Amino acid sequence: MAALLRGNACAASKHYKFTMKRDDMEKLNRDITGSAASKGEVHYRGYHQGQWRLLPEDAPLDDVNWIDVRGRISEHDWSAIAAQLGLELNVLLDKVESGQHSQYFFDPQCEGIIARVLMSASPKFNLVDEAEENTDLVETLNNTKLSLSIGQLTVIKTKEAVLTMTNNADALADHVMKRYHEADETMDHEYFIYLLLDSLIDEYYHVMIDMETRYELLEDMILIQKSTKHLGALHDFRKTLFTIRNAASNLHDALENRMMDREGSHSVYMRELYEHLRSIEDYALYFREGITSLIEIMLTMNDNRLNEIMTTLTVFASIFIPLTFLTGVYGMNFDYMPELRMKFAYPSFWLLTIALTLFMIRYFKRRAWL
């Protein structure tokens, strides 16, 4: 799998810049602040001498200044953050609008990346252990549905600080803070963004590994157990693959645009992320082709099963055709039928019927039709 997860990166995309429609500013403010603004959190963190520490809003700058926004916050909080970043409030609100596709944006005041966060929300299980404990793989699959937790990460970098806004992805920011503390590198804003994106891409890998386990389970059910009741599961699997590949592809294009715009001391790390995203796209394409093959196999199995049923019904119909003919002839009640007045006519009829039936069954078996 490791070889499969490492692909050669070669992609070209259009460079674009995000702009928001100004005529919907009121709707944006409702979306950003929301009625649940009180549930949001803002943490001002500074990294200095190997330690993270919480800072007040007007604290002096440290080596790395990180404004960590989680959930929806009030417009007053956004105003304070805009002042800390040295941005106009309207410019900041443009960038943190929710529901955007992964992209890279750059203007004289700031630059940033918007990315989709994908995390597996399905129960974890080991394929071998489950198969040993429960031989009914169909039941195992039904009890372990594949589901994704989808969030959004917005990263904005200015000369003063880095802003991250996470929606349904708080665990990602916590993981980055831990990794940053353990990293043996020059601590600056650029390397912090690299660790943030690297942790996000690691979650993509975790989702793909989870999907690989479930793919093997589906494959076993279809190819080994000859089960033909999983079109719904395969369809859901393909939809999830589309979501992952779309998120990875958009982030891949965003990183490519960023690398085209600038080169820095950590550009080699960004290029590594670019390669990893390319491998995830290849991995998703591999799974999509596998799912397509499984669907074709299952449809073929359904057709073969239907053909077997039709063959069996045809054989039985063929056996009864001559018997129906005989009973029809001797059931017409003609006055002059010499056979009907023979002493052994009735048992002879049954012997003929049984012999004809046995002969036809043997014939159909020799032709492998029965």
Image (cartoon, grey):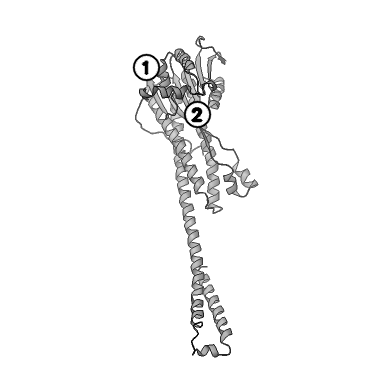
From where the camera sits, is residue 266 visible? no
Residue 345: % across, % down: 56, 87
Give whichever of 89, 364 is nearer the camera. 89
Locate residue 170: give its quadrant.
Answer: top right
With respect to residue 145, does 158 lie above or below? above
Q: Secondary structure at mark 2?
A: helix
**Dot 1: within a 10 Å radius of its alpha carbon, few (fewer than 14), some, or many (20 or more) residues?**
few
- Position of 17 compared to 96: left or right? left
Seen at 45% across and 51% down, the residue is: 296
Give whichever of 116, 276 is nearer the camera. 116
Residue 161: % across, % down: 47, 15
Q: Kindly give the residue lying farthest to the right in the view shown.
A: 133
Which label belongs to residue 108? 1
Give whichever of 67, 278 is nearer the camera. 67
Seen at 56% across and 24% down, the residue is: 174
- Position of 125 compared to 253: left or right? right
Could you tell me the amino acid type at mark 1?
Pro
Whole-number angstrom distance, CA of label 1 to CA of label 2: 27 Å
Which label belongs to residue 200? 2
Seen at 50% across and 47% down, the residue is: 232
Q: Earlier in the sequence, mark 1 or mark 2?
A: 1
Give whichever of 2, 281 is nearer the camera. 281
